Image (tube, rainbow, N blue to C red):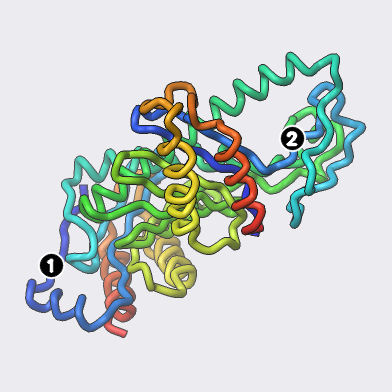
Amino acid sequence: MCVSLIQPPIHQSHRHTKRLSRTVFALIIINKAGGLIYNRTFHEGGLNKISTNELLVLAGTFHGVHAITARLNPIPTPGANRNSASSAGTMMRPEPPSGLEVLESENFRLQCFTTLTGIKFLLFTDTTQTNVDLTMRRVYEMYTDYVMKNPFYQLEMPVRCDMFDRKLLSYIREINNR
Amino acid sequence: MVVYSFYIFDRHTECIYSKSWLPPPSVSSHDPLTNPPTHPQHQQPPPHQPQQPPQSTTTTTLTLTQKQSSDNAKLLFGTVFSLRNMVRKLGGPDDAFISYRTAQYKLHYYETASSLRFVMLTDVSTLSMRNVLHQIYINLWVEYVVKNPLSPVEHKGGEGVRNELFELGLDQFVRGLM
């Protein structure tokens, strides 16, 4: 697993937490089978440090919960029963219910972006962070540019791409130091 | 702002109270074509509960919906429980899960010190309902359920929760919000 964390000196990170409240804590990428394929912490002290094993469990759990949250949709959809959808034609097929998109807790905020291919990007930020959509979009762009276009990258496998690491780190650092 | 449904889970993970403010699905499953998708996003819930389903099918639909809602409650509890554990793992033991949002609905969560869990499903534009759930706990639960001398200590199967005052108070309180 890729857990080569870059740790800033401790005194520095403390200064950071005091000075800025808007921070991106970490990024996790989960593949379509629920496996953890990328994990990076950008800001120490935002989230608890947990072991890779626990993180793997967490990724799997989140994958399942995400599927259930889509099923829990309380609003009855027009095409809820399949016969009507098929008999009425394909034009009126409703948007499928989406799973969890934003989770809020007292200490952090979790934004989840699911690609059409089922890969999940989980961005952990400070509760006051704004414009996470934009950050997420940029991260996804980087993923497509530096991971998907890497000829040595195997689909569904852990992401080990230097370029992606570097670009991502410099982009997030820019946000965190703003 | 629209409130879809509300659930209470006790410390034995049992759903001891659930209430839905959505109109019961008028679409009968055996006759899908007659119902054009007049849908949904109703801004105002109807002031009165819509009419009962036809008498002939009442018993079967009732048991079916009962089973469905009990299954739903179990799914809901599993989701909320997993997410709460995830939040605690990441944000530290004093962190608390507040809410999550999907594209269709938003779920609000409040847990008391005695592991009583209040869950509310609303539309996505609703702001934090944590204080509302807290108010329900203080003003309705404690007043009408805890202080009721006839109510048991453990509410197995929802015993003692479904009293008139609590139901009425809850309904008025939530309709006042909408």
Q: Secondary structure at mark 2?
A: loop
Residue at point 33%, 60% (across, down): A106
Residue at image mark 1: A7
Residue at point 16%, 61% (across, down): A5
What's the amino acid at mark 1? Gln
Packing grade of label 2 (10 A; few <14, some 14-19, many >=20) is: some
Residue B158 image point, x, y percent: 49, 26
What's the amino acid at mark 2? Pro
**Residue B123 quadrant:** bottom right
Residue A113 image point, x, y percent: 47, 56
Q: Is residue A156 above or below residue B63?
A: below
Packing grade of label 1 (10 A; few <14, some 14-19, many >=20) is: few
Residues at badges 1 and 2 in contact (C-beta under 8 Å)? no
Q: Is residue A67 visible?
A: no
Residue at point 67%, 43% (across, down): B21
Q: Which mark is residue B24?
A: 2
